[in-house]
Image (tube, helix red, strand yellow):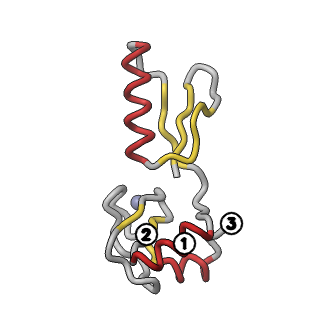
């Protein structure tokens, strides 16, 4: 998941967002202040068990590099390409559990 950092204070103003949502929100805030002040950052790659269970059922997977969810990923998929960051770091839900990416 992603969070938004206020560049002036160094504090996170919003957390647990998807990349798209975080970027939209940061852009909107930047427009209000008329400056690039809000930075989108990755948060550590840990997924909740509910997210993993839902992803196994829906055949989606998560990228451990950026947190983006991808469609059409088998639960035992490993190192699939990520549409978000381009890295081959998308894994299926069962693999994420085995690898310890679940909180
Ligand atoms: Zn990614």
- Mark identifier at residue 89: 2
Nearest the eye: 60 or 87: 60
Measure the alpha-carbon separation of dots 2 and 1: 16 Å
Vertical order, 1 against 47 (above or below): above
Nearest the eye: 82 or 55: 55
Viewer-nearest of discs 3 and 2: 3
Where residue 71 appears, as percent x and y from the top left, is 33, 70
Do labels 2 and 1 touch, CB within 8 Å?
no
- Mark identifier at residue 103: 3
Location of residue 29 (image quadrant): top left
Vertical order, 27 against 55 (above or below): above
Measure the alpha-carbon separation of dots 3 and 2: 19 Å
* Ligand 1 shown in quarter: bottom left
Vertical order, 93 against 22 (above or below): below
- Give the total number of marks visible in the rendering: 3
Mark 1: secondary structure = helix
Measure the alpha-carbon separation of dots 1 and 3: 10 Å
Where residue 6 appears, as percent x and y from the top left, is 56, 26
Viewer-nearest of discs 2 and 1: 1
Report whether the residue tagged 2 is closer than 8 Å to ligand 1: yes
- The residue that appears at 37% across and 18% down in the rendered structure is 31
- The residue that appears at 55% across and 76% down in the rendered structure is 96
Say whether residue 80 is left or right of residue 98.
Answer: left
Nearest the eye: 21 or 33: 21
Where residue 17 appears, as percent x and y from the top left, is 50, 46
- The residue that appears at 62% across and 33% down in the rendered structure is 12
Vertical order, 61 against 44 (above or below): below
Mark 3: secondary structure = loop
Q: Which residue is mark 1?
A: 52
Name which of mark 3 and mark 2 comes first in the sequence.
2
Do labels 1 and 3 touch, CB within 8 Å?
no
């Amino acid at each position: 998941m992603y969070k938004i950092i206020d560049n002036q204070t160094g504090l996170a103003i919003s957390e647990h967002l998807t990349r798209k949502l975080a970027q939209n929100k940061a852009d909107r805030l930047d427009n209000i202040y008329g400056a690039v002040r809000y930075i989108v950052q990755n948060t550590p790659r840990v997924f909740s068990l509910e997210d993993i269970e839902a992803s196994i059922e829906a055949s989606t997977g998560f990228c451990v590099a950026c947190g983006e969810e991808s469609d059409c990923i088998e639960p035992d998929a490993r190192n699939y390409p990520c549409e978000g960051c381009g890295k081959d770091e998308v894994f299926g839900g069962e693999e994420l559990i085995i690898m310890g990416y679940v909180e």
